[in-house]
Image: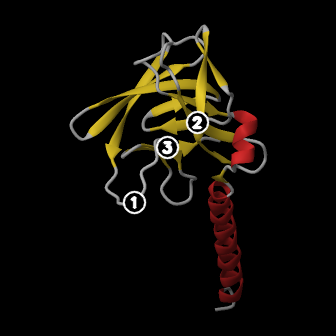
Amino acid sequence: MRHWPRLFSILSIFSGLISTAYAAAENNHSEWRAARDSELREIIPARAPVEKERIETEFRTASGITDGKGKYVAGVVLITAGYAAEGKYSHFLIAQVPVKIGQLQLSPGEYVFGWQRGEDALTVKFYNAQTGVFLGEVTAERVNRTGRIESFHIYPPGGKPLIQIGRFAMAYEIGE
């Protein structure tokens, strides 16, 4: 019986450590928030470097997230009419941290992607923006929701982290 107070004290400390670790892990993702237009203007180029071309971006479609400490994951629709990329790429993506989209792991860098519509999903193909090298594909599932549909949107982690293309979305995770 003499050991109960000590055992209770040890369990309380252990419980506190677990709670602190859980809160720290939760805060790691809750620090990410939607980037403001002024922040996006600093990182989204007016002309994205795609292979040997510099393709215009449509800034009004820009969307991104930031950790508030200078790291971003952001993207924008490309205006590909008249460029070699027409029909192959539709979006430009900047990842300043590792990001996993579906099962595709991307290192920090610049990427382009395009999509093909299937029955109830999109097949989204990712490429290195500088070289055009194919990196992999991800399925974007139809999102059942009402209201305004945006051409491109990145939702911050915390709730349900999604990259949305029109009525379709793919899950992502921020890496360490």
Q: Quadrant of the N terminus?
A: bottom right
Q: Horizontal and vertical percent for residue 9?
A: 71, 82
Quick one: 111 or 56, which is closer to the camera? Answer: 56
On screen, 160 above or below 82?
below
What residue is at 53 percent from the left and 44 percent from the top? Answer: 173
On screen, 133 above or below 20?
above
Circle 2 is placed at which residue position?
75
- Mark positioned earlier in the residue sequence (3 or 2): 2
The CA span between labels 1 and 2 is 22 Å
The CA span between labels 3 and 1 is 23 Å
Label 2 neighbour load within 10 Å: few <14, some 14-19, many 20+: many
Displayed quadrant of residue 57: top right
Label 3 neighbour load within 10 Å: few <14, some 14-19, many 20+: many
Circle 3 is placed at which residue position?
172
SS at badge 1: loop
Q: What amino acid type is highlighted by mark number 1?
A: Gly
In the image, farthest residue toward the top = 52
Quick one: 96 or 57, which is closer to the camera? Answer: 57
On screen, 115 above or below 9?
above
SS at badge 3: strand
Closer to the eye: label 3 or 1: 1
What residue is at 69 percent from the left and 67 percent from the top? Answer: 20
Displayed quadrant of residue 148: bottom left
Closer to the eye: label 3 or 2: 2
Q: Horizontal and vertical percent for residue 5?
A: 70, 88
In the image, is 121 to the left or to the right of 150?
left
Label 1 neighbour load within 10 Å: few <14, some 14-19, many 20+: few
Q: What amino acid type is highlighted by mark number 3?
A: Tyr
Circle 1 is placed at which residue position?
147
